[in-house]
Image (tube, rainbow, N blue to C red):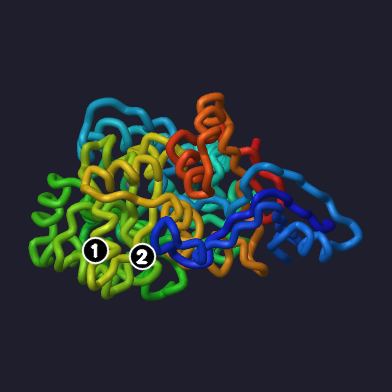
Amino acid sequence: MGDLLIRGRVLSFLREPDGVEDHASYRYEEDGAVLVREGRIAAVGSHSAVSARTGPDVAVADHRPHLVLPGFIDAHIHMPQMQVIASYGAELLDWLNDYTFPEETRFSDAQHGRRIARLFLDEVLRHGTTTVAAYCSVHKASAEAFFEESHARNMLNIAGKVMMDRNAPEALTDTPQTGYDDTKALIAAWHGKGRQLYAITPRFAITSSPEQMEMAGALAAEHPDCHVQTHLSENHAEIRWTQELYPQARDYTDVYARYGLIGARSLFGHCIHLSEREADAMAEAGGVAVFCPTSNLFLGSGLFDYQRYRRRDKRLRVATATDVGGGTNYSMLRTMDEAYKVIALQGEKLNPLQSFWQLTRGNAEALSISDRAGTLEPGTDADIVVLDASATPAMALRRERVETLAQELFLLQTLGDDRAVKAVYVAGRAAKR
Ligand SMILES: [Zn+2]
């Protein structure tokens, strides 16, 4: 495969922006280019400088006047919930029982899992997302289907088979031993194969017995380079029930801490109602709080306090995510639009530079993959999204009044969705269908 030169208005973040005027936090080239060689970024910068470094056999993808950014990263999403999204009328626990659990039982059929895995990765790529941290169903075959499809596309994805051994339908439970054995086998088969990464995935404390939590902790200790993903402090009824099930724990966060499940690769979906003690404990252990705004609004779970979590003395690591099917859209642009509103309801504003840093480098850092994705740094994998801020008539009209890059980003976030995604590259290969 020869070189690929991707030309456009190239934008990537060097560090977290400190306000909307922090122009040193990003690299922007009006006539820029990214040089891709063997799936990796070989050079980035002005078109004139980068084009001087191409090999003799170069293909050019000219995306002017569109923006070229690192692909989006979604830090929490459920593959088996494509046919759960848009289910009416319930809060978390009823939503799980009425809609989600029945749907997830269908993944005992491996053929169904393969079909959904293919459609799932098609859908996230169409929306400009090149990496997800995904939950599969309890069935080992669902994770195999996910990884086979992800590996065939050469995507950098994190996923795991859900572990759950109680408070769920019989057809949807494993046991402490089978959950451990299946996870162990999946790690051996898939973790580090190509670009695949495994996440040890106890669904949440309610659906795992203390014996299973111990097994999950053992897996995390045996595989410190694997991620851990679960849910934490989403909804008041969930928090109450968890405390009844784990009376020895000081609080919900302490349940996970007691089983050794909080570390730098641990991702906790929601974290909406953490006490100061819990936020301190989470920050000290380096766990990541994953903000899922469309889901939190849809299920009426509450408002994630993004600004306070980041500003507190013991700062929390934060990522953002769709949480489909509790979430209502696959688009990380729609997700950050809703994040903006959740933060606005708490009297603050999320600036557009911060937003686009979070979608790319910020989420890559939270997932501990920024050495591979999220930055456009030479040597990293060429996962790239191309965005058009005039993608619809309404966007084109609004854009007539746009004067700055930050305004253009805010327009993309506020009005944009999959229609604004003009192209996607996965390890340098065109991927949008
Ligand atoms: Zn979730």
Is residue 107 visible in the rendered image? The answer is: no
Q: Neighbour class for label 2 at 10 Å: few (<14), some, many (≥20)?
A: many
* Left or right: 79, with 303 as reference point: right
Q: Residue 314 appears at what percent x and percent y?
A: 25, 72
Image: 111 above or below 159: above
* Earlier residue among tags 1 and 2: 1
Q: Say which of 278 and 414 sits in front.
A: 414
Amino acid at circle 1: Glu
Q: Which residue is mark 2?
A: 266
Residue at the image position 29 percent from the left and 53 percent from the top: 231
Residue at the image position 78 percent from the left and 54 percent from the top: 4
User: Which quadrant holds residue 353?
Assistant: bottom left
Tell me if the residue at label 2 has its CB under 8 Å from ligand 1. Answer: no
The residue furthest right is: 56
User: Which quadrant holds residue 184?
Assistant: bottom left
User: Which quadrant holds residue 163?
Assistant: bottom left
Q: Neighbour class for label 1 at 10 Å: few (<14), some, many (≥20)?
A: some
Q: Which residue is mark 1?
A: 211
SS of the residue at dot 2? Answer: strand
Which label was assigned to residue 333? Answer: none
Amino acid at circle 2: Ser
